[in-house]
Amino acid sequence: MAERYKLASGIIIHRNSLPNGDLLISLFNQTGKLRAIAKKGKKLGGNIARMSLFNDITVQYYQKDANSLAVLTQVQLNGSLEKLTLPEIYPYAHILAEMVDKLSQNDLSEPKIYSYLASGLKGLSEFADAEKITIIYAWKIIQQAGLAPRLEHCSICNKNELSNRFNLNTGGITCTSCNSGVYISNEVLEYLQTIHKTTIRAMLEHKLLNSKEHWKLLKNYSSYHINEIKSLASLETMI
Amino acid sequence: MRYPPSLLNLIRELGKLPGVGPKSAQRLAFYLQKQTSNDIQALADAILDAKDSLQQCKTCFNISEKDQCAVCEDSLRKQNIICVVAEAADLLAIERSGEYSGLYHVLHGNLSPMNGIGPDQLTIKALLTRLDNIDEVILATSTTVEGEATAMYIAKLLSEIEINVSRIAYGLPVGGDLEYADEVTLGRAISNRRAV
């Protein structure tokens, strides 16, 4: 007989309050995404403080079968990053969490994406340059999800003589003969190429230039290849 | 046997209400079907009347039947202090406490970029226009990550103006035992302790 009570640990990447006092959370870990409901989770004195967005928790849940929604029965807090609520960091944390939420599937193992999310959120709460950290981790997450842009060869004809045109439709840079797409500067192109070739630790040493252009490209690329990342829109108003 | 279309439609509409699942909707539909036409008419009228007459207060964005809500119209309340809350229901909760007699400002949500809620979707700009002759702003958004971030964002905006900004206290519920408190609440209660 299948065990109906299970344990899972992970980071809360989405939290939705329902009008009847229940909480609907999305927990992301190495084995994928778990959507679960905490009955009367908004009630004070229960587990509400543990079930805050971006918290790392372990839960016991009850799930009748694979198609039904998991019901949380116990919650334990493993860690929380309080600095993520700071106005200069908060929207960046949302970008990473939303991106992972939109890229991940239930029960699909994605240990590397989990590791990027966990270290990205930790990096945001510990380092000064939230903008740089978010851009690096966002592209790393996209790369790990198998949607990395083509930056070494023309994304249309595979030639090597690259232009400064990025074609969203073909998902990468184009050559001087194909020459189609939006303009990107040499600094942004080189930065992106380095992100995809090197480690995050090494990447943190590189200076981020033309950040507005980076955000524009990330916004357009993710809208085309993933889905609209709503958090990206809030950057203009919150930062 | 299939339900008659009108009954099915009623169950479907009732099922859209928060906290009402399919079974409860079915139970309510059967209950309503047994009521007199007058009672049903009174219920329908009450729903339509509330929908037609309720609006947001033009000053504080509380729910009101007039341009100004009862709190904003009350000249006996302290006019130099504003308590910022996320929802009108939070305002009513604070009013029930009987401890506050100043003005309010309802934001109608908390900042949540992943849900498309930024500062422009809230009434933050309107709050900034109300600060003449105000000595203190109390940030009474919830203590969730979203509520905390909203409070910190508003505090950052207000730091450029000479005005006292305070945040509601964190801590244990009155009458609660320490051993049953979760570690986050207890940690906050310790770090935000006060002298006695």
Image (tube, rainbow, N blue to C red):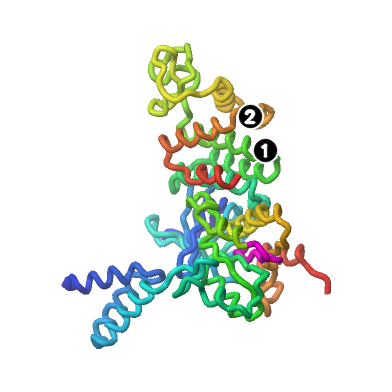
Magenta-tinted stretch: B131-143
Prevailing SS of the magenta stretch: loop
**Amino acid beneath label 1:** Asp
Q: Residue at x 59, y 52 (%)?
A: A54
Q: Are marks 2 and 1 on the same chain?
A: yes
Kindly give the residue lying farthest to the right in the view shown: B196
- Percent x, y of residue B94: 60, 75
Q: Amino acid at mark 2?
A: Leu
Q: Chain of mark 2?
A: A
Residue A194: say if magenta.
Answer: no
Observer-nearest of A9 and B170:
B170
Q: CA distance from mark 2 to mark 1?
A: 10 Å
Q: If the image is split into quadrants, where does the C terminus of chain A sit?
A: top right
Classify residue A156 by image quadrant.
top left
Query: In terms of depth relative to the viewer, which is nearer, B44 or A158?
Result: B44
Query: Is A207 displayed left or right of A171 in the figure?
Result: right
Q: Residues within 10 Å of mark 1 (few under 14, many from 20)?
A: some
Check residue B133 for magenta coloring.
Answer: yes
Is label 1 in a helix, a strand or a loop? loop
x and y percentages locating residue A89 in the rendered image: 63, 46
Residue closest to the eye, B162 or A182: B162
Q: Which residue is mark 2?
A: A208
Residue B162 occupies quadrant? bottom right
